[in-house]
Image (cartoon, grey):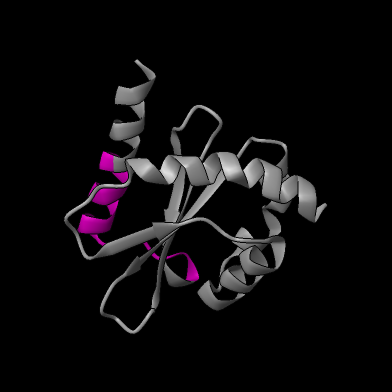
Amino acid sequence: MEKAFKIANNKNIELLKFAPSGTNLKMYCPESIADLVERGFKANHCVGSYSGRIINGSSKIFFIEEEGVNGAYFTTFELNRNNELIQAKGFSNTTPRPEILKFIKTFIENIQKEEI
């Protein structure tokens, strides 16, 4: 299962090149199923159970951290197979700050520009 996860997740990692630059936000993907589970536990939400969705391609999971905040976990967001936002959640399913949501929106727009 871990091998299938890494193969599927490599496609998501390729999308990181579309992350907006010039901000103090860092975006990345889970490195393994264990990483996904651990981050879900630390964020106090259910993303840790999404490995099957990543493997079958129905979900793309990304994490955002704010640089300079001592590596503090910040936001998790999910795109569907068409790169549309499904959800974005902070700790305990809180709504991310407006600047985080704007960052995610720009990321999606950058992907869509490339797809045209």
For the record, the magenta segment spans 92-106
Q: Quadrant of residue 95?
A: bottom left
- Would you place residue 17 above or below residue 91 in this image? above
| Outermost residue, left side | 22
Q: Position of residue 81 (x, y in %)?
A: 56, 30
- Residue at horizontal 77 percent and vertical 45 percent from the top: 4
> Magenta: predominant secondary structure element?
helix
109 displayed left or right of 81: left
Q: Position of residue 3 (x, y in %)?
A: 78, 50
Q: Quadrant of residue 108?
A: top left
Is residue 20 something that shows in the picture? yes
Quarter of the picture holding the C terminus: top left
| Outermost residue, bottom side | 70
- Residue at horizontal 29 percent and vertical 33 percent from the top: 110
Q: Position of residue 66 (x, y in %)?
A: 30, 70
State the residue in front, 74 or 14: 14
State the residue in front, 79 or 34: 34
- Residue at horizontal 63 percent and vertical 63 percent from the top: 36
State the residue in front, 46 or 62: 62
76 displayed left or right of 48: left
- Would you place residue 73 above or below residue 56 in this image? below
Q: Position of residue 44 (x, y in %)?
A: 55, 73
- Would you place residue 116 above or below residue 21 in this image? above
Q: Quadrant of residue 54?
A: top right
Residue 101 among those drawn in magenta: yes
| Outermost residue, top side | 116
- Residue at horizontal 70 percent and vertical 68 percent from the top: 34
Is residue 96 something that shows in the picture? no
| Outermost residue, right side | 1
